[in-house]
Every structure is written in C-alpha cells, then in structure tokens.
Image (cartoon, grey):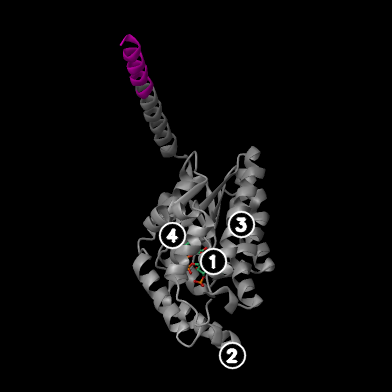
Amino acid sequence: MLYAFCAYSNNCTCTYVLGAFVLLWVLVWFYRDNLEITKVSEKHVFVTGCDSGFGHLLCKCLDKCGFRVLAGCLTEKGADDLKRATGPFLKTFILDVTSTISIQKALEWTKKEVGDKGLWGLVNNAGRSLPMGPSEWMKIEDFQSTLKVNMTGMIEMTMNFLPLVKKARGRVVNVASVLGRVAANGGGYCVSKFAVESFSDCLRRDIQNFGVNVCIIEPGFFKTQVTSLEPIERELHRLWNQLTPEVKESYGDKYLDKYIKIQRLIMNTICDSDLSKVTNCMEHALLAVHPRTRYSAGWDAKLLWIPLSYMPACVVDIALKLVLPKPAKSV
Ligand SMILES: NC(=O)c1ccc[n+]([C@@H]2O[C@H](COP(=O)([O-])OP(=O)(O)OC[C@H]3O[C@@H](n4cnc5c(N)ncnc54)[C@H](OP(=O)(O)O)[C@@H]3O)[C@@H](O)[C@H]2O)c1
C-alpha cells in the first residue's frame, strides 16, 4: 500500500516537473523568437525577383519597416511599378540571375550603396517553375531553364554577395518550396528546390562561426505567376507536342486532358491568395535576433507537405498514384 502511494506521488511529481519544464521551454522559445534587431534604417537588404509575387510584396513591407531595400528586378516595368509603390529609400537594379555579367554589375552597385556597413540581408527569391509535368516528357533543356534560375542563379548570387553579408554579420534568406521536401512534379522545379535546401544547409553549417545566419523559406502553394494555370497548361501542350508517337501512344489520347484537369483541381483547391503568410516569414528571418533555420508558410505546407516529407517514400508514391491519371499502357 505504502509502496503504491510512493510510486503514485513520484509519478505525479515527475509529471509536474516535466510539465513545468515544457512550459518554461515554450515561454523561453517565444521570448527569444520575438526579440527584434535595432537600427533597421542603417541596414541594407538585397532582394532578387522583385517584379511580382513574394519579392514585390516583401520589398514594400521591408520599405515600410524602414530597411534600405535594394530590389533586383528582371524588367524595367517591374522596377518602375515597385518604385511607384514605395518610398525614396528603396532603390531598384535590373538583374538577371542567370547572367554572370548582370550579377557582377549588381554586386558593384551594391558595394557602392552599402559602403563599409556591408549587406545585412540577401534574399534569393527569384524563381521560375515551368515546365512542370511528367519527367519522361522533358528534354534536358527543359530541366536546364529552371535550374539556371532557381539553383545556379541562387548559388552564384550567394557566392558573390557573401563577403558583403559576412561584413555585416547578416543573413542569407533562400526561398525553397515544399516541393524541395516532397518531389511531386517532374521537371527542373523540384530538383532545383531540393538543391536550394541542400545548398542552404551546407552554407549554414560552414558559415555559422562567422555570425551569418542562413534561413530557408518553404512556402506551400500560393497564387502567383509561378502557379498560374494558363502558362502551366501552355507548357504541358508544348511538352506533349514534342513527344514521339510511341511515347504518346503509351500514355493514350486522353492522358493530357486528364492531367490538366487534375492540375486545375489542385491549383484551384490549395493555392492561397494571402502572400503575406510568406513575406511575414521572410521579414522574421531579417528582423529577428534569433532567426529560425526553416520557415514553412501556408496551411498546405504545415498540414500536408511537411508531414508528408517525414513519411516513407512508399506513402508519397501511393498518394501520387491515386491522384494522377493512369497511362493507357500502364502495367
Ligand atoms: N507561388 C508559390 O506557390 C511558390 C511556392 C513555393 C516557392 N515559391 C518560390 O517563391 C519565389 C517567388 O515566386 P513567386 O511565387 O512570387 O512567383 P513570381 O511572381 O513569378 O516571382 C518570381 C520572380 O522572379 C523573377 N525572375 C524570373 N526569372 C528571373 C531571372 N532570371 N532573374 C531575376 N529574376 C527572375 C520574375 O520576374 P518576371 O515576373 O519578370 O518574370 C518574378 O519577379 C520563387 O523562387 C518560387 O519558386 C513559390
């Protein structure tokens, strides 16, 4: 009886101690997570791909926060639109991340802008998604066009701008995707986003002793040009038209239409139009004293893609088999 009572009271004490520890841990985590840096108006942040989508919105938010924003835009029109929507401290520069010369010019311009202070933040946001579709439908050029922007462009920007970020003991913020965690689409996009994840992990581990943080943003599906249905469908038709008669026959006449219908269903069901869910993560990565290593943005990322990424590969295989249409000559 006495033994049972002692065991019971010991169990209770253990539960209380554990509960108190968890509560304390959560409180400390929240406190640390909410600590913000000061002297924002003395800090420069360079963002790539600011013509539209997350990059465009992020520049407007950072400008409002008081950061000195250096916005890399692919087009003059994108730069003009952004300038019209922001204050006098935001500056734009025409940048194509697939061009070494363009990156060099952007670097020289940035050096002049930041002076001795260095660069507080580099946000590698520029990206393209197309073509996306069944892997067998791709030619090597179809992979390369995406990899050149999302992977090589991001790495070349980082390697060139890193000395400036190191000087400011700042941050590199790389925009990956949930498709850098779960390979759900053929083409260069998933390959490139897996590369963003691994490059960022390596860089963070190599550079941590210099006080530079490397953060990875993993958005779910959001309504931007990247997920726009019209170009996705146009590219799927182009891929289909370049297939040999044998490959077309193995998929069957109806496959393309069924595939497009499923893409429409997925995009219309899960794409979120609130882009601020992503830019809030980017802002936290630049403003927090202790930025997080990974940020997942959007309900589909948190509830579907990230949990799926921890599952065995066969679970994802089965899920995709159930969702995608069956080719005519499947075994
Ligand atoms: N939307 C999503 O669901 C989603 C999900 C996960 C990750 N992401 C990633 O988020 C990032 C931003 O995409 P977004 O959704 O905001 O789409 P977006 O509106 O198309 O933004 C991409 C930006 O990159 C620019 N860009 C394209 N090629 C470039 C190049 N060679 N050099 C410099 N800039 C270039 C585009 O310029 P133009 O507009 O002039 O072409 C555009 O401003 C991308 O890395 C994307 O992969 C998006």
Q: Which residue is mark 1?
A: 127
Q: Which contiguous range is marked in magenta? A: 1-15
Q: Is residue 32 left or right of residue 205?
A: left
Q: Give the Cα separation between the discs numbered 4 and 2.
A: 36 Å
Which residue is at 51% across, 61% downward?
91
Amino acid at circle 2:
Pro
First-in-chain label (2 vs 1): 1
Asked if the beta carbon under badge 4 is closer than 8 A to the nearest atom of ligand 1, the reply is: yes
Q: CA distance from mark 2 to mark 3?
A: 52 Å
> Which callout, 4 or 1, points at the residue further toward the start of the chain?
1
- Reading the image, the residue beneath label 3 is 110
Q: Which is nearer the eye, 144 or 108?
A: 144
Q: Which residue does the image show at 35% across and 11% down from the upper left?
A: 3
Find disc 2 in the rendering and name its residue: 245
Q: Is residue 11 magenta?
A: yes
Q: CA distance from mark 3 to mark 4?
A: 31 Å
Ligand 1 has an atom within 8 Å of the beta carbon of the residue at disc 1: yes
Mark 4 residue type? Gly
Residue 10 in view in this figure:
yes
Which mark's residue is nearer the viewer, 2 or 3?
A: 2
Q: Secondary structure at mark 3?
A: helix
